[in-house]
Amino acid sequence: MQTLDKSTLINKKKKKVCAIINLGDIMDCIFCKIANKEIESKELYQDDFVIAIMDINPKSIGHTLIITKEHYTDYTEVPAEVLAHINRVAKRLGDALMEKLEATGMTMSVNYGSAQEVKHYHMHLIPVDSKYKGKKTVDEAFKILTTKAED
Ligand code: 5GP
Ligand code: ZN
């Protein structure tokens, strides 16, 4: 699944400046803590660049967040190659969510500025009209999504 080469993204000079500016933000950042496994989450997918977890307060059954492992405040800071990678993950994961939850559609969204509550980049995948709509908790949805189909 992972097609992005981590070495192409490292711009040491830029990273150093970002690190100084954002150090306080990063230390308090809930999504950094989730990405670093300091806080538990219901994880559906991860690779070198992103982690996908179930939203704690879902707008629909299967509401999932794709979070960058690196702390970027919002989409304007995310390198283009990483945005492309996130979109590839979103497509694959979105298809899997729709199939497993028998949803008819998917809202994929990224909030910004005053619309964005958590200031660490993330993309929302929100399945629409699942057959389980209104009938399953986050725990139950997680079980459906992480249980392999019988052969
Ligand atoms: P935003 O408005 O920043 O795009 O949305 C933030 C999302 O993160 C919300 O849907 C909210 O429910 C979710 N969220 C906030 N804190 C946590 C957390 O600690 N764990 C998980 N899994 N989701 C969270
Ligand atoms: Zn962060």
Image (spheres, rainbow, N blue to C red):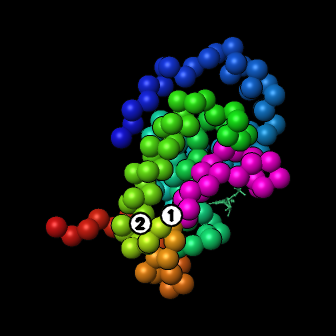
Q: Nearer the viewer, residue 55 or 74?
A: 74
Which numbered marker is on residue 106?
1
Q: Position of residue 57 (x, y in %)?
A: 65, 69
Q: Earlier in the sequence, mark 1 or mark 2?
A: 2
Q: Amino acid at mark 2?
A: Met
Label 2, residues with CA under 10 Å away: few <14, some 14-19, many ≥20:
some
The answer to whether one can see residue 133 in this image is yes
Q: Residue at x 74, y 26 (%)?
A: 19
Q: Is residue 22 above or below residue 11?
A: below
Q: Is residue 119 left or right of residue 44?
A: right
The answer to whether one can see residue 62 in this image is no
Residue 110 falls inside the magenta stretch? yes
Q: Which residue is mark 2?
A: 98
Q: Residue at x 44, y 72 (%)?
A: 104
Q: Position of residue 26 (x, y in %)?
A: 74, 39
Q: Is residue 147 left or right of residue 69?
A: left
What residue occupies the far left of the structure in this picture? 151
Measure how far apart labels 1 and 2 are at the Cα level.
7 Å
Q: Residue at x 56, y 62 (%)?
A: 107
Q: Position of residue 24 (x, y in %)?
A: 81, 37
Q: Residue at x 60, y 63 (%)?
A: 55
Magenta residues, start to end: 107-126
Determine contact: label 1, label 2, CB under 8 Å: yes
Q: Is residue 16 left or right of residue 56?
A: right
The reply to whether the residue tagged 1 has its Cβ within 8 angstroms of ligand 1 is no
